[in-house]
């Protein structure tokens, strides 16, 4: 079953990569430098976890794979834009991302700013341009879900809170609030949008799925914090130990490594519990939960 999951993940990562290659503007199209920088920032790196979550959630609602592919690309473009902007000198000021220079290092800061803006607008263009749901109302809700996840009540708001927290001591609820927005909001959007590509779910099912996303969103960040402490720059593809160097509050700084591992495991169990209502249809989401905790391929 584990090998089966690896095959499934690789096939869908390849599908997303091929779709990104096709849907991003070609570097021959004016303005060439901007389009080249967009492709540099998106293609050939990353594990595409958010699109994989969209595909897995789509299995719950028996969604058409072509619909979920576009939805997954849209979410991945938002994620890529956030990384480009996060790496800017005015944010985290990093020089390495996915094993290669960050966008502002490879090009310049102005280009990196425009890359992020362009990736974000392309994401919403795709959600509006393709037929992704059974009704216009559902598709409009998908656009709303992604907009909320990316904005001040989601990822951007979480980043603002993160910047304000540098050098401060946060308690656990404050740290969770920050990461529910900064990291968890886009993970939630990926799952919910993927599910929206298929058949309607009951309110009870949607509530369980929403609670599931909260658990895995926090688990993802807990593991990120542990990896920032334990892994090397070569393994991460980005600068290791940067959170500690910048005096940022993390799950490791608050709990210690051992308790952070324990928290991640508890979040895994909580996520599993929310998926019980779906039975075997949630097999891929369970496997992705394991992967988020283990990060072993």
Image (cartoon, rainbow, N blue to C red):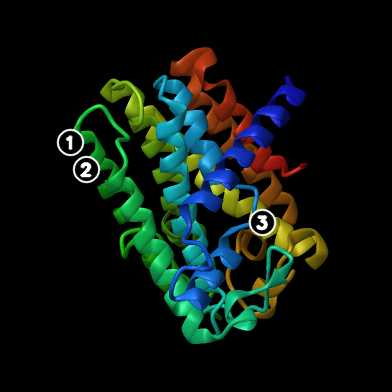
Taking 177 as reference, is 12 above or below it?
above
159 left or right, relative to 292: left
Question: Quadrant where the N terminus lies?
Answer: top right
The Cα–Cα distance between marks 2 and 1, rounded to whole angstroms, is 5 Å
Q: Which residue is mark 1?
A: 137
Which quarter of the figure has residue 206?
top left
Q: Earlier in the sequence, mark 1 or mark 3?
A: 3
Which quarter of the figure has residue 242?
bottom right
The Cα–Cα distance between marks 3 and 2, rounded to whole angstroms, is 31 Å
Q: Is mark 1 in CB contact (under 8 Å) with mark 3?
A: no
Viewer-nearest of discs 1 and 3: 3
Q: Which mark is residue 280?
A: none
133 left or right, relative to 268: left
Q: Which mark is residue 140?
A: 2
Q: Earlier in the sequence, mark 3 or mark 2?
A: 3
Give the residue at x 35% y 25%. Answer: 198
Q: Is mark 3 in CB contact (under 8 Å) with mark 2?
A: no
State the residue in front, 198 or 175.
Answer: 198
Residue 2: % across, % down: 74, 25
Residue 7: % across, % down: 71, 28
70 left or right, relative to 7: left
Residue 130: % across, % down: 32, 41
The Cα–Cα distance between marks 1 and 3, rounded to whole angstroms, is 35 Å
Toward the front, the furthest residue is: 28
Q: Residues within 10 Å of mark 1 (few under 14, many from 20)?
A: few
Question: Quadrant where the C terminus lies?
Answer: top right
Give the residue at x 32% y 54%. Answer: 124
Q: Which residue is mark 3?
A: 44
Residue 142: % across, % down: 29, 42
């Amino acid at each position: 079953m584990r090998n089966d999951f690896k095959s499934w993940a690789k096939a869908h990562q390849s599908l997303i990569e091929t779709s990104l290659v096709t849907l991003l503007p070609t570097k021959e199209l004016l303005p060439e430098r901007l389009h080249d920088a967009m492709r540099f920032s998106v293609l050939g790196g990353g594990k595409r976890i958010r699109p994989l979550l969209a595909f897995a959630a789509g299995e719950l609602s028996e969604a058409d794979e072509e619909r979920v592919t576009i939805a997954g690309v849209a979410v991945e473009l938002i994620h890529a834009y956030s990384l480009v902007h996060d790496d800017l000198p005015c944010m985290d000021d990093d020089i390495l991302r996915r094993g290669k220079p960050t966008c502002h290092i490879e090009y310049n800061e102005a280009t990196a700013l425009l890359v992020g803006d362009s990736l974000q607008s392309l994401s919403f263009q795709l959600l509006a341009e393709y037929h992704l749901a059974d009704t216009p109302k559902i598709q409009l809700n998908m656009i709303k879900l992604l907009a909320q996840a990316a904005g001040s009540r989601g990822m951007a708001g979480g980043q603002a809170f993160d910047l304000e927290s540098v050098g401060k001591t946060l308690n656990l609820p404050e740290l969770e609030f920050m990461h529910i927005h900064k990291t968890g909001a886009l993970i939630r959007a990926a799952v919910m949008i993927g599910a929206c590509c298929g058949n309607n779910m009951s309110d009870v099912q949607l509530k369980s799925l929403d609670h599931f996303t909260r658990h895995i969103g926090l688990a993802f960040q807990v593991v990120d914090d542990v990896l920032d402490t334990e892994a090397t720059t070569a393994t991460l593809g980005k600068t290791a130990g940067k959170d500690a160097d910048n005096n940022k509050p993390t799950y490791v700084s608050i709990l210690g490594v051992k308790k952070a591992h324990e928290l991640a495991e508890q979040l895994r169990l909580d996520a599993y519990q929310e998926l019980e209502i779906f039975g075997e249809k949630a097999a891929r989401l369970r496997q992705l939960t394991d992967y988020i905790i283990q990060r072993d391929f």
